[in-house]
Amino acid sequence: MRPKRYPQGLYCSWWLVLSLAGLACAQMKSTVYQPDETIFANPDQGFYLYRNLHTLESDVGKHRAQGLTLVWGRIDLEPYREQTDLPSAFLAQLEEGFAIARDQGMKVIVRASYGHRGTGGDYRTYEDPSEAMIRNHIQQLAPVFANNADIISLFEAGFVGPWGEWHGTDIARDYDRGRDVLMFLLAHTPRDRMIVVRYPYLKQQLFARCDSGFLTVTADTAYSGLPVARIGHHNDCFLSSNDDVGTYDRGGGKRSEETAYLAAETLHTVFGGETCRLYAYNDCGRAVQELERLHGTYLNNAYQPKVLQKWRDQGCFDQIKRRLGARLQLIDSCVSSSVLPGECLRIEFSITNSGFASLYNARSVQIVLEQASGQHRVYHTLGVDPRLWKPGQTYRLHEVLVLAEDMPAGSYTVHLYLPDAYPSLADDPRYALRLANEDVWQADKGFNKLASGIQIGTASRQR
């Protein structure tokens, strides 16, 4: 039988909240948490594995032991550049790739591309298929994306340019045509998933205004599902030259101006990519600083190998691996030590984010009360969006929860639980968020322990 879950809104009346708020934390069970500096897996973030999605190995989940939870899943459309309809067998292979990722506890970054060699045998002579062909293929892929939205972390725009990187072709150079393709892709991918584009100038042109400016994502529009809020950024030559090999200065803007734009955007979207060659800019000091500023969430685990080795040699590789994405850490908590069924349980905790970025996909925040015997477990969903827990910030949460009248008496442990938002994954602990604290994580349940020994209905309360 599924444990009881209480939706947002089942809280004590405000007069009681204010009354309880006057209680000193010392009258409650107080805990101070120790940080965990180890590297561990968390969903939707970190270094990724580069794979072809339609040939994904059945045991890809073995890489979770190395702290990897992301597969960069290429959809190779090169054999179908001149075919109006994608073969049903190929679509079935993609479905199987997603099924393997789900079975193995992984998530997927999706990019479709039509190869990178043109008539001259290199990327410089590459040409896109017709826009009609691209649109038709996107329409055929849309049901596959919808069926597997739970297991998709994000999309890289793809489809246009060699490697799907939106450069060098007629569509990539014509921002009106590019806007049409990208808006079509937005309409045929799950509304709760972001699409990242290769160049800052590209997004600026996609959302250009008549007054020569451009729309940007703000705190008010973030996570709204609006097109401007769904478009993030990736850089596949991160810190690899003065302009990151053409990433910047595409429209005449200075690197400093474009990175300032990215820093504001990626506070509310997602940023990732890979390096592509050795350069002074990707020395450790600047690399960490840039990932902090641009809110880095994901990077290629294998490319560029010389740069990755530099980070190991200079001593920042582990820090980067540990801090990619959000790294949420409890500081302290206070929990009512003894309450009666039908009355109120007060919980306060402080949490900080020491990662480079915030979460970018929706995730619920729940308090779980678990009887010591394991016979009873109750879930309370809080009205909190953890995507708003931004890097470098600390938050204090005050929650007062009403307990059911028929709640069994006993000793309880109180947990903080951050499961995946999709019902298909909500009970899978591999997709729950682990906090960076010692002695709180329970891998078999996906819970983070706040406090134990909380007595419900078994001891008189102090008044």
Image (tube, rainbow, N blue to C red):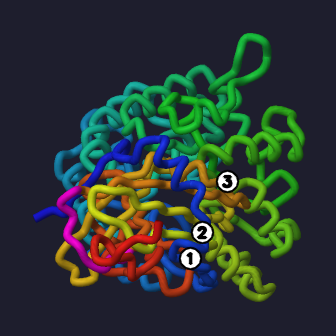
Decide: marks 1, 2 in contact (CB < 8 A)? yes
Q: Amino acid at mark 2?
A: Cys
Estimate how packed mark 1 is, as few (under 14), some (14 to 19) or many (20 or more) residues with alpha carbons within 10 Å.
some
Of the two numbered discs 2 and 3 in the rendering, the one whose residue sits closer to the viewer: 2
Identify which residue is drawn at 64% across, 41% down: 167
Percent of width and height locating residue 103: 25, 69
Of the two numbered discs 1 and 2 in the rendering, the one whose residue sits closer to the viewer: 2
| Callout 3: SS | strand
Percent of width and height locating residue 183: 49, 27
Q: Is residue 7 visible?
A: yes
**Distance from Cα at disc 2 to Cα at disc 3:** 47 Å
Quarter holding residue 428: bottom left
Q: Amino acid at mark 1?
A: Ser
Percent of width and height locating residue 332: 61, 73
Question: Which of disc 3 and disc 2 is earlier in sequence?
Answer: 2
Q: Which mark is residue 25?
A: 2
Q: Is residue 6 magenta?
A: no
- From the image, tell me which residue sits under label 3: 235
Decide: marks 1, 3 in contact (CB < 8 A)? no
Q: Quadrant of the N terminus?
A: bottom left
Q: Which residues are drawn in magenta?
A: 405-413
Q: Which mark is residue 30?
A: 1
| Callout 2: SS | helix
Decide: marks 2, 3 in contact (CB < 8 A)? no
Given residues 35 and 454, the one toward you in this image is 454
**Distance from Cα at disc 1 to Cα at disc 2:** 7 Å
Identify which residue is drawn at 29% across, 73% down: 370
Of the two numbered discs 1 and 3 in the rendering, the one whose residue sits closer to the viewer: 1
Question: Which of disc 2 and disc 1 is earlier in sequence?
Answer: 2
Identify which residue is drawn at 86% across, 40% down: 257
Identify which residue is drawn at 38% across, 41% down: 81
Q: Note whether 105 is above or below 395 in the view shown.
A: below
